[in-house]
Image (cartoon, coloured by chain):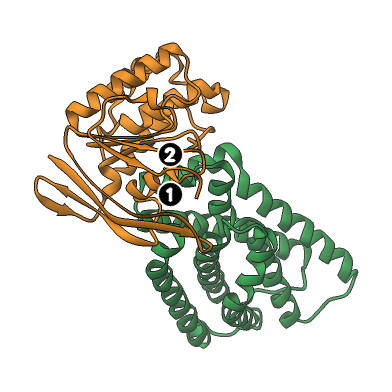
Chain colours: A orange, B green
Amino acid sequence: MIEFEAHAITKTFNRRSIFRDISVRVQSGEILRVIGQNGAGKSTFVKILAQVLTPTSGEVRFSLEGHAVKRYLHNLIGFVSPYMQLYDEFTAEENLLLSLSMRARPDDMTAVKNLLGRVSLGGRGDDQVRTFSSGMKQRLKYAFALIHQPPILILDEPMSNLDTEGIATVRQVMEEQQKRGILVVATNDHTDLENFDHQVDLGGRS
Amino acid sequence: MFLKDWRSELRTRYALSALVMFVLTTIAIIVFAFGGESPSQEVLAGVLWVIIFFSGMSGLARTFVAEEERGTSLTLQLLATPTAVLFGKLAFNVVLVLIVNTMAVLLFLFFFSSFRVDSVGLFVTTLTLGSIGLASASTIIAAIIARANTKGSLFPVLSLPLLLPLLMTVIHATTLSSEGAFFSEGLDDFRILVSYIGAVTGVSYILFDYVWKD
């Protein structure tokens, strides 16, 4: 069972306050929705949760099976966002294998191919990512985020660049993630996620 | 991390092209500048390390700058610990600079026949330790400037004060090697170089967490 607690998270950039004193606690099986208008700091907040950005004050604490986890948090988190880029000189399969090897997991071509098939990239595993459309790259990002079966999945603008089929796949991913662990969704479209357990509303532009 | 960067470099040649072209053009310009003159061994030793320093400035920042420019910095932060990123990229820069510097030395010896290497062991050790020192300092500075707007000019500006002790030491040791000094006469310089590498790498390890994460 995985859990995280964001405690009094504040972030300022160049003396401009993005958000202040945000606290939320999320456990396995729960969904956190982060909403706010453009520029409210949704992406900043989820990056702090994903441990790629440091808050100005406050902290995010993680625990697994009741024990605090402070190291190798990147192994617990999958992250998808429109501004994240994969290595376009590598093939789709190579990007996924890179994710496994960097996390000291054994190469698992079966899992790689299955996951690519699931995001409708089954026949494109050997193609370099530079040849992909933006929608295909977004699908690949989901495969990249899921290949190591993270207990925490963070999605920033999850439906970005996706067609109807892609959106259906993402909704299925979201349902499965809720059963497996924690799902965090940052969106300014409330229809992206209507059922949630916790909500952080960052409001309007700071 | 090292394998990822190496495979990426073989496919894109971001850094290698910059380094190789810089070495070639710089040596060509210096050959023309010197004309038929034969500068002293000390001058030639200095010129060699000027070429090596500026070729490093033209290409060693690419390991981090390329990640920022392509938007894969975030991906890397999600994939690996800061320590893995630092030492993987350091290893890559060390291998890269050793390859390019070996090429630079061979070309230098070819075009400047008056430059002698009478103590080969001393020279090779100096080149190796100097290259490792150059890579270790350049790696942390590259990480620092990767997000700056003026990264192109900032990199050599920040690197020079940090690399000056290294350059002074390797130029001295290279001069000794061209004068036929015994290997033992270079031990003081080697101690400085090893200490430099240890200090820079240690400080890089301590500071990198703060540099890497916003």
Q: Is residue B28 above or below residue A35?
A: below
Q: Residue furthest front?
A: A204
| Figure check: B125 above or below A20 | below
Q: Position of residue A111 (x, y in %)?
A: 28, 23
Image coordinates for residue B131, horizontal then vertical, percent: 55, 66
Q: Which mark is residue A36?
A: 2
Share a chain, discs 1 and 2? no
Question: Pointer 2 indicates a residue of which chain?
Answer: A
Q: Is residue B9 left or right of residue B83?
A: right
Q: Secondary structure at mark 1?
A: helix
Residue at horizontal 44 percent and vertical 77 percent from the top: B194
Whole-percent x and y of residue A41? 45, 46
**In the image as oriented, which residue stretches furthest toward the right?**
B35
In x, y percent, where is residue A64? 14, 46
Q: Residue at x 66, y 54 (%)?
A: B19
Q: Which residue is outermost to the left? A: A66
Q: CA distance from mark 1 to mark 2?
A: 40 Å
What quarter of the picture does the N terminus of chain A occupy?
Answer: top left
Determine which quarter of the picture holds residue B162: bottom right
Q: Nearer the viewer, residue A7 or A20?
A: A20
Compared with residue B82, is residue B6 higher up or lower down, i.e. above or below?
A: above
Please give the label number shown on residue B85: none
Q: Amino acid at mark 1?
A: Phe
According to the picture, the residue beneath numbered tag 1 turns out to be B2
Specify the subunit that label 1 lies on: B
SS category of the residue bearing label 2 = loop
Closer-to-camera residue (A199/B128)? A199
